[in-house]
Amino acid sequence: MKLTLLTAIYTIAQVSALAPLEPPLGKVLLGAWYDRNLTDTPVAVNARINYKPLAFFQTDVDFSSTLKPWTAPSVVIPQFLRQLNETQTDAIAYLTVYPFQGFANITDAQLQDMANRLNQMVDAGHSVLLRFASEMNGNWFTYGQDPIGFIASWKRCITFWRNALGEKKNKVAFVWSPNSGNGYPFPGGEYAINVNGTDQATLDNLKVMDTNQNGILDYLDDPYMPYYPGDEYVDWVGMSIYHYGKEWKWVDNVVPEADKFEHYLQGNPTNGNSSGYYPFYSFFSGPSGCVSNITNEVVSRGNKPLLISETAATFHFAYLNVSSTANPNNCSVPYCQSTATRLDIKRAWWRSFLNQNFVDKFPMMKAISTFEFIKEEELTWRDFTMFGPAPNPYGDTEESVAQATAVVNGFTADAQAGMFPFLVYANAVQTTGAVAATKTSSAASRHFFKCLVEMVGLVFSLI
Ligand SMILES: *[C@@H]1O[C@H](CO)[C@@H](O)[C@H](O)[C@H]1NC(C)=O
Ligand SMILES: *[C@@H]1O[C@H](CO)[C@@H](O)[C@H](O)[C@H]1NC(C)=O
Ligand SMILES: *[C@@H]1O[C@H](CO)[C@@H](O)[C@H](O)[C@H]1NC(C)=O
Ligand SMILES: *[C@@H]1O[C@H](CO)[C@@H](O)[C@H](O)[C@H]1NC(C)=O
Ligand SMILES: *[C@@H]1O[C@H](CO)[C@@H](O)[C@H](O)[C@H]1NC(C)=O
Ligand SMILES: *[C@@H]1O[C@H](CO)[C@@H](O)[C@H](O)[C@H]1NC(C)=O
Ligand SMILES: *[C@@H]1O[C@H](CO)[C@@H](O)[C@H](O)[C@H]1NC(C)=O
Ligand SMILES: *[C@@H]1O[C@H](CO)[C@@H](O)[C@H](O)[C@H]1NC(C)=O
């Protein structure tokens, strides 16, 4: 009796304990990945939204300074800190760390340097969401589709950083974040695993990736579980989710279906080829977790807070090689056909997950990062922004600025109309040392449950 009750209480406490930086149930942090390289800034994003300051800002670094020197931590992080400071808020620093040099080439010196910088960010009043080697199940990054190499590297890096952070590790959350599984294993990518490879490392990887064990790596294999390092090494889970249009070749401007975002997050067995087959949220954030088909072991006990790591509904505003020199904003037949405006497309997207029903249905979705970029990808020039107009490398017309402005104004109008009561924004800070309300409450509830467990344990041991 005594043991059963105690076990129950410990279980409740465990379920209720919050991960680092996790807001309380029913609350969702909103943030943005801004185009640092093209002179966008957090202050400028907040000004364009013209409502409340975003809870976090995202930027990216790469350990290897040889590939792209301007992405080295020593260049990016001091600038990032200055730009966060300019917001005069306690905004969380969301750092995407790319190991483009390859897992095996990461040195202890690089890990120590990053640990020092994490310490510095926390000391400056900015907690950190750190997303390491994101989209590792994709084949567009140098380190992609190497689950065994990824997991070993993840464990090494996260263990190193947690040890180096000591007490401060409660202010740094490590985010494991694959790409949404629709289209997996993404045939044709530059860094796709070689399905005909005969070296031992490739054979070992193929064995864990072939989750239905039918000897073929294809769309019916689980795109997530093979890459999961284990609950104890992961604070948050995350996923990249995008709307590019209706179908490949992704050149048409269409309003996303209301359930598209949900289907990317959870899979859709009846339309798995376009949505993915596997329920990511249930596996890692739901109450039951998931079991490996191959080893029959528990992969995750679930209950992980979920960050939508990067999301956008794209608007294709020019087709490459057709209009690029003529007019940067020309989207004529037969390309980039529009059945909708930028605002129609993007508002349908944000309303599909920024609504109370969705938040109630997926209560562990605790943070969302928008992708504030205008860039060239595949066949088109794309406006991903929700809080634009962001700097446009291809030049702007009055028309495109007006369209992008209508989008951010549409978001602000929705927010002012009270459509997002669950969103959490940043707190104003005048001096260093002040602590965010949400962070205080996370720490406080953790502490509360710990005390509760100790007190109840004491009472029972006295009975
Ligand atoms: C980012 O900025 C650097 C340095 O100014 C430049 O060399 C690089 O081409 C830029 N990258 C992109 C993607 O614009
Ligand atoms: C490590 O770096 C070397 C030299 O740049 C490169 O040839 C090698 O492929 C890298 N290793 C991995 C695992 O990426
Ligand atoms: C693997 O081998 C099969 C059969 O020989 C071939 O059809 C396929 O193109 C090969 N795939 C790759 C990625 O080399
Ligand atoms: C693997 O696991 C998934 C999800 O639990 C399940 O739907 C699928 O049927 C399993 N496949 C096999 C081959 O056991
Ligand atoms: C999914 O795609 C595969 C490979 O192209 C195809 O063989 C299969 O029939 C498709 N399944 C569905 C349900 O469309
Ligand atoms: C837009 O592109 C189409 C197709 O290439 C071309 O015929 C047309 O002249 C362009 N319009 C403008 C305004 O540039
Ligand atoms: C655009 O033109 C360049 C140069 O002719 C070519 O290399 C590239 O593949 C073309 N891109 C597309 C998307 O057609
Ligand atoms: C910004 O930096 C200044 C100088 O270090 C510091 O006094 C101030 O508290 C910082 N502001 C914020 C919001 O962190």
Image (cartoon, rainbow, N blue to C red):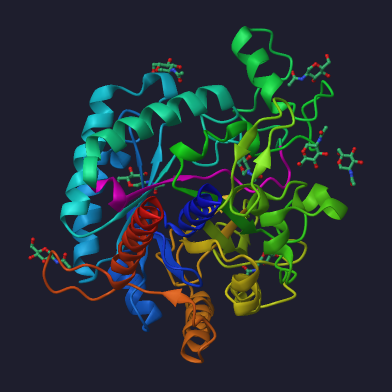
Residue placed most toward the observer, 129 or 397: 129
458 to 145, vertically: above or below? below
Q: Nearest the camera: 127 or 347?
A: 127
In magenta segment, residue 174: yes
Give x and y (percent) for residue 72. 28, 38
Q: Quick check: 404 left or right of 68?
A: right
Tell me which residue sits at (66%, 30%) in the image: 297
Task: Report how many numbered discs are placed on residues in the image.
Answer: 0
Q: Position of residue 287 (x, y in %)?
A: 62, 54
Residue at (71%, 68%) from the top-left corner?
Answer: 256
Nearer-the-camera pick, 302 or 120: 302
In which quadrant is the C terminus drawn?
A: bottom left
Q: Picture coordinates of residue 377 (x, y %)?
A: 58, 49
Q: Compared to 299, does 322 lie above or below?
A: below
Above or below, 355 against 164 in this view is below
Please say whether residue 248 is visible from this viewpoint: no
Magenta residue span = 168-184
Residue 104 higher or lower than 318, as above or below: above
Camera-nearest residue between 9 and 166? 9
The quarter of the image that holds ligand 3 is top right
